[in-house]
Amino acid sequence: MASLQASCTLFAKPSKSFTYPHFQVSCNAKKPSSQDAETSQVRIDRRNVLVGLGGLYGASNLVSNPLAYADPVQPPDFKKCGNAFDIGTGDPLKVNCCPPISDDIIDYELPPPPHRLRIRQPAHMVGKDYIAKYEEAIRRMKELDKTNPNDPRGFKQQANIHCAYCNGPHDQVGHKDLDFQVHESWLFFPFHRWYLYFYERILGKLIDDPHFALPYWNWDHPKGMTMPPIFDNPCSPLYDAVRDPNNRASAVVDLNYRSSAPTNDLRQVDINLRTINSEMITGVNNNLQFMGAPYCDGSCPRPGMGTLERGSHTAIHIWVGTKDKTGEHKYNEDLGNFYSAGRDPLFYCHHANVDRMWTIWRTLSTPVRKDITSPNYLNAQFLFYDENARLVRVKVANCVDHKKMGYKYHYMPTLWRHYSPPKKQAKARIMEKISDIPKVAAVLPITLKNTVRVLVPKSAKGKVSEQLVIEDIEKDTTKFIKFDVFVNDEDDDLGELDRAEYAGTFAQVPHKTKNKTSKSSISLDLTQLYDYVDVTDDDTIVVTIVPRSNGEDITIGCIKIVPVPSEDEVESNDDN
């Protein structure tokens, strides 16, 4: 029953539980108490087992701690902060990412929402008065670095927050040598929301303007698909010289970053809109596919990214970062690496739009449940310094509703909502050539040195809801890793993504923790894709995986198609 290696429970309490002997626990998961264990048996939730038997993240490293009574992840202990690691050598970085230490930690309470919410505006539309105010706030934040380098509100200290939470200096509390990581899991959106919240309030405090709000880089709209001009002025404190010089001014961003992007700007815009449609709508069948996989106390880092995190979010990081492979900034600094991303003021503008996409996703009129109700998610905690330099402890539960945090977003049209690809007019002929395509079991594990095509059995014939699960993705964390996935694609030229057969992507921003390699998994929903590509009568499909960056450093251990679980199998129901 190896397929039962699922992770921390998604449920508030067991509903119909049973025992399963010799249940394997990984990643230093907490042992059961005497009340929870009977000899060598562990109580597990019935629906957790259903997930493990073929539902979302079943039998995958996306969920690595199987105990049904796992606890929420605890905030890191700042007093035990260690070295962040150089991504090339494994040696400590030449920067101290550790935050200042305080003996006083305050449980943060959100102030009552103001009568007038702060409005985050599109960066390409802001006026001169706002630009002057924003530049002055950043200028004063940078001045704190000179007058008091230990002030946690200073620009360098704020930039180091991302390094401290993402590049290995903190262990999970109670789990030595197990990194605390806020990426590649359901912590991704809430952590960055809290990060921006305090960053924004610090800037407002520095210029004595409680209504100040960060701008957002509106990269999901054609008019915002270039670097916002306010960040490209060398005389401005918003400027960062450590960026790719080819991706400034009028260059159109590639939201599915590839080495062979279209040279036609209009074509690039089309692909960008199709990419976002896939990340927000057609590629999502439940909340964890969008938000990311569960991550609890004792979980292995990087259980699995959601669609937006591994897609547009990662693409922007890499597109902006440097491409100098031999010089001082050889690791895609600043924005192109986790440890240095916060040094670029554009980071906060980029993540403001990532946050905005979360707010939009929660309002989309789809049957998918939008909010995670698991207490292991809602009670996860982080530590930040607020605008008064107080060390505060915050919970995920208190950031789910952004308006309760006192801000909202200026409306911009979301053209990507209806930008799905046209249906195929004829059944794919690739099934006529299956004698030349190996069965998936015969080739795995496989390193992505070249494009891989394999036959993967469906779970059932007919029009069914299924997902493609790619597991045991072992990759070098120090490099930009990316591959794209297609289903029943018969075209030898797989450079274009706005096609019916495109299933999704995997990509990571370079970073380094204690181990140079890590494993992860992804779940790609096929429900909508089956509507675009006629596979009704097939019992097998062709899966094509195209390496886009550093394929020689990617090894895949498992590819399978399983039924899409019901919402009750993914999350707890109201009776829990």
Image (cartoon, rainbow, N blue to C red):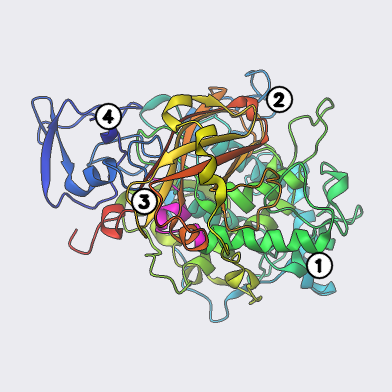
Magenta stretch: residue 235 in it?
Answer: no
Instruction: Find the distance from the CA under tag 3 to the CA under tag 1.
Output: 37 Å
- The numbered mark, 1 or 2, whose residue comes first in the sequence reads 2
Instruction: Find the distance from the CA under tag 4 to the CA under tag 1.
Output: 57 Å
- The numbered mark, 3 or 1, whose residue comes first in the sequence reads 1
Residue 342's spot in the image, x, y percent?
68, 45
In the picture, the disc for residue 377 is 3
Q: Is residue 358 above or below residue 309?
A: below
Give the SS element for disc 2.
Answer: loop
- The numbered mark, 2 or 3, whose residue comes first in the sequence reads 2
- The numbered mark, 4 or 2, whose residue comes first in the sequence reads 4
Q: Nearer the viewer, mark 3 or mark 1?
A: 3
**Residue under circle 4?**
2
Q: Residues within 10 Å of mark 1 (few under 14, many from 20)?
A: some
149 or 496: nearer the eye?
Answer: 496
Q: Is 148 on the left-hand or right-hand side of 242?
A: left
Give the SS element for disc 3.
Answer: helix
Residue 574's spot in the image, x, y percent?
22, 64
- The numbered mark, 4 or 1, whose residue comes first in the sequence reads 4
Q: Nearer the viewer, mark 2 or mark 3?
A: 3
Three-letter amino acid code of the residue under disc 1: Ile
Which residue is the extreme one toward the left?
Answer: 38
Give the SS element for disc 1.
Answer: helix
**Residue under circle 2?**
94
Instruction: Find the distance from the CA under tag 4 to the CA under tag 2.
Output: 43 Å
Residue at the image point whose x is 61% and y is 60% from the top: 276
Three-letter amino acid code of the residue under disc 2: Lys
Q: The magenta stretch spans which residues?
A: 282-294
**Residue under circle 1?**
131
Q: Nearer the viewer, mark 4 or mark 1?
A: 4
Residue 440's spot in the image, x, y percent?
45, 32
